[in-house]
Amino acid sequence: MYVAVKGGGRAISAAHAWLDETRRGDPSLPELGVAQIEQQMGLAVDRVMAEGSCHDRFLAALAIKQSKGDLIEAAFLLRAYRTTLVRFGASDPIETAAMRLRRRISATYKDLPGGQVLGPTFDYTHRLLDFALAAEGAPREAAPEAGAPVGEVPRVTELLAREGLMQREVPDDAEPGDLTRQPLAFPAARPVRLQNLARGDEGFLLALGYSTQRGYGGNHPFVGEIRVGHVAVDFTPPELGFAIDIGDIAITECQMVNQFAGSRTEPAQFTRGYGLVFGHGERRAMGMALVDRALRAQELGEDVTAPAQDAEFVLYHSDNIEATGFVEHLKLPHYVDFQSELENLRTIRRSAMQDLAE
Amino acid sequence: MAVLARAPADDIAALLPALPAHDRLRAPETGLVMVRGRAGGDGAPFNLGEMTVTRCAVRLGDAVGHAYVAGRDKRQAELAALVDAALQDPAHHDALMAAVIAPLAARQQAVRDAEARRAAATRVEFFTMATMR
């Protein structure tokens, strides 16, 4: 018999009131402002924009405040908010070659046009806790400026492609699939895979990328180039009919150079894995590029043997909003399901006992 | 529009002597634009993710001004649309460019230059160690 029950309303309101109180913490301390989060927790904001798949620093910072710093919860809030807004259309593809660079490095060439620009990086820090930061309000030295600014620099992959050493991307202006409008279907084309990875969970991308390096579908990657900076977005409003520049977004791009593909008719060439994400997110862009390359296994004539090469496995499990929804739904009442399982188990045990007794 | 799209509302307002009377054809509205990238930087387009954008359209005399600006600042979008409409009047175009657009553009360029010089200060200069035999 199924018995509908309801209740818990008062408990839920009390729980949420307590949540609000714990979010605020000790009231004798100043409250954290959204602008402070946006400015001083910038990489958390970047991650929430990437996984929430919505570039808006203030909204991401607000979501972090509301979620008490739970970044997956914050990305969830941002994804939910975006569904309340109308979509004006799609931008022209951004021109990453024209990025305003804060950082640009290559692990494949020491001397390359434009040079190695480190930008604001954790690399080469000693990873020692800096107790000086615990003393707030200490004066800080301004970062040095050089006489000649960094301008536009050519892509490393383009340098290789010009020599025929790097497989070129296929120029294709077909309308890309959009996961926010159509559900995932297989086989998934590369544009859909890239959209899925760009908003995938950073930990998942990192672990899968790592697995390819450890031999599960490896293809011997080099970082051809990582770029961090700002790029202008051009959008063509239907009522105007021509493209206008609507402002800048922060992005990170990773071009991974991988081992060769060739055939009897085509000489061997390097192949690429591509990562592009909102904000400053090198780890996530690198993970994305490794997984993108792994997912191209079939297209490049490699055996599909490892998890990172299995498109269904990767694309169905990369989204942390979906994953957290399905895992956390287990917390919801399953009283009736469980009763039926209990009943089953009791019946099995009863009949086993009877068999033993006989 | 590139300059207005990057200018805070207060900065635009401070440079506009007096706000001319105008009609709103489309009240400021915040929505989304799907940002596209290209596979490998130059291959097939794909949907990277959305960004917030605010749009507005105003009528000023016979001119219709449009604005689409990144972010959610409705005042900025309305001011940008207003300047866009005013710029279409040949009698005011040059004066407005000099009084509003040029100072905003100069400010934005200065910020960009400072960042580019800061980036340049982190450019690695390699030097060769003693050659091993």
Image (cartoon, coloured by chain):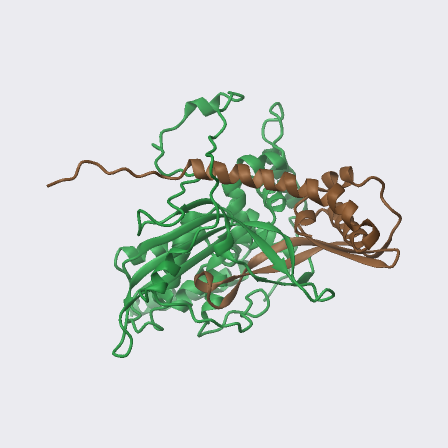
- Judge by depth and name the residue closer to the eye, A335 or A42: A42
Outermost residue to the left: B133
- Relative to A332, residue A166 above or below: below
The brown chain is B
What x and y, as percent, mark residue B25? 83, 58
> To which quarter of the image does residue A170 belong?
bottom left
Q: Is residue B6 left or right of residue B58?
A: left
Tint applied to chain A in the drawing: green
- Relative to A121, residue A25 above or below: above
Q: Residue at 64%, 45% (x, y): give it.
A: A12
Q: Residue at 48%, 46% (x, y): give it.
A: A151
Q: Residue at 31%, 61% (x, y): give it.
A: A258
- Quadrant the C terminus of chain B occupies: top left
What x and y, as percent, mark residue B132? 13, 40
- Judge by depth and name the residue closer to the eye, A329 or B79: B79
- Judge by depth and name the residue closer to the eye, B104 or B55: B104
- Judge by depth and name the residue closer to the eye, A343 or A101: A101
> To which quarter of the image does residue B67 belong?
bottom right
Determine if residue A319 is in view. no
Outermost residue to the bottom: A265
What x and y, as percent, mark residue A233? 59, 56
